[in-house]
Image (cartoon, grey):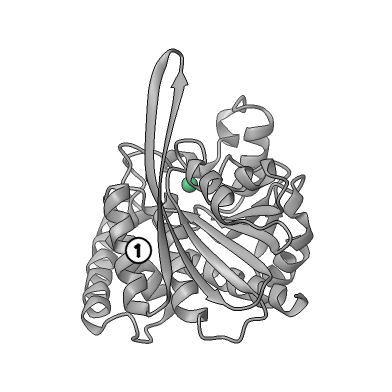
Amino acid sequence: MNNLRSEEFRTWRRARWILAVAAFTAAGVQAQNPVEDDLYGHVLLLEGKTSAERGTYIETTLRKSGVGYMTTPFRKVFINRGDTVRIAGNNIVARIGRGSKRVVVGAHFDVSTDSPGANDNGSGTAVALELVRRLSRLDWNCSIDVCFFDQEEAGNVGSTQYIRQFVIPSQYVIMINVDVVGMGDELYVGPTTGSGSSVLALFRDAAQELGVRMVEGREYPSSDHESFTKARLQSISMSVVPAGDGQRLSTYLRNSGAVDSSSIPRLLSVIHTPDDRSIYVQPASLKLAFEVMSIVLRRLNEQL
Ligand SMILES: [Zn+2]
């Protein structure tokens, strides 16, 4: 496909989706749109916003959904190379289900500087919002904290704060982190060397059920799962990536970025750049992430 045709297609698709979002906003959040429409609608409404504006959007969406949530502001001051660094943020935690066992779903909503953040992590935020909206009324044996973490990009600060405030080790089951799920059709789960490998079988089942390829990465990019691993709590991360990128990401990380140009992960041309835009986010990828998480959470719930 040449560039012009590609651009025409994107313009058409954008127009179609803006109409879909208009319908989404006017009808309110209880409307039963196809899940990919609602997911992509969230990405469009999150794109280009600051972290604080994203937080406001998440709270507004949760309020309309009728699900209880809490906001937990935090501050952190530390010295970096002689300079005092001050970080402030605000985690948003929606709780669904009931019971003493606690599963955590994480999606950071803060955005890297100079990036519109459609895929990283508007995509994961959208999936987390729809998990709350669509799964809250199911009969759960456990409670699920769906956490919208702030300040992941500053070194997983928000998730570290959540652990300090809310995790009771005897009740805690696992944290499943949803980060960058907006491009491609390959499920990438990891790190497999981490403490969360106990749920890998559930991800394999979900991938098989949905007929998608899954790559289990020994290596996985830094994200909020690391805060939990450091605290000796089970955790794992999942992404949806372009075909082949699961392997490329693992190799890239294992070699500290020293790979030939053909092995550079495709995602890196977009993530943390001004090109992390909704035109490169695919509704089908978002839907795949939502469906995988729905299956994994339901199966995990059956085991508790
Ligand atoms: Zn991210």
Residue 254 location (% of width, % of height):
69, 32
> Is 3 situated left or right of 210 in this image?
left
Task: Out of 52 and 15, give the one closest to the viewer.
Answer: 52
- Rendered image quadrant of residue 222: top right
Q: Which residue does the numbered mark 1 point to in the structure image?
A: 58
The answer to whether residue 6 is visible is: no
Place residue 66 in its image quadrant. Answer: bottom left
Residue 96 appears in the picture as rendered: yes
Q: Residue furthest top?
A: 82
Residue at 28% across / 70% down in the picture? 17
Report whether the residue tagged 1 is closer than 8 Å to ligand 1.
Answer: no
Q: Specify whether 275 is left or right of 215.
A: left
Image quarter hosting the C terminus: bottom right
Seen at 73% across and 54% down, the residue is 196
Residue 218, image x, y percentages: 73, 43
Dot 1: element: helix
Query: Considering only vertical position in the picture, is 259 above or below 195?
Result: above
Neighbor class of circle 1 (other Cα within 10 Å; few <14, some 14-19, many 20+) is many
Q: Is residue 160 above or below residue 287?
A: above
Quarter of the figure with the N terminus: bottom left
Q: Residue drawn 36% across and 48% down? A: 117
Quick check: 218 above or below 234?
Answer: above
Please name the residue shown 71% across and 76% down the image: 299
Q: Nearer the viewer, residue 25 or 106?
A: 106
- In the image, residue 229 lies at what x, y percent? 68, 45
Q: Number of labelled discs? A: 1
Q: Amino acid at mark 1?
A: Ile
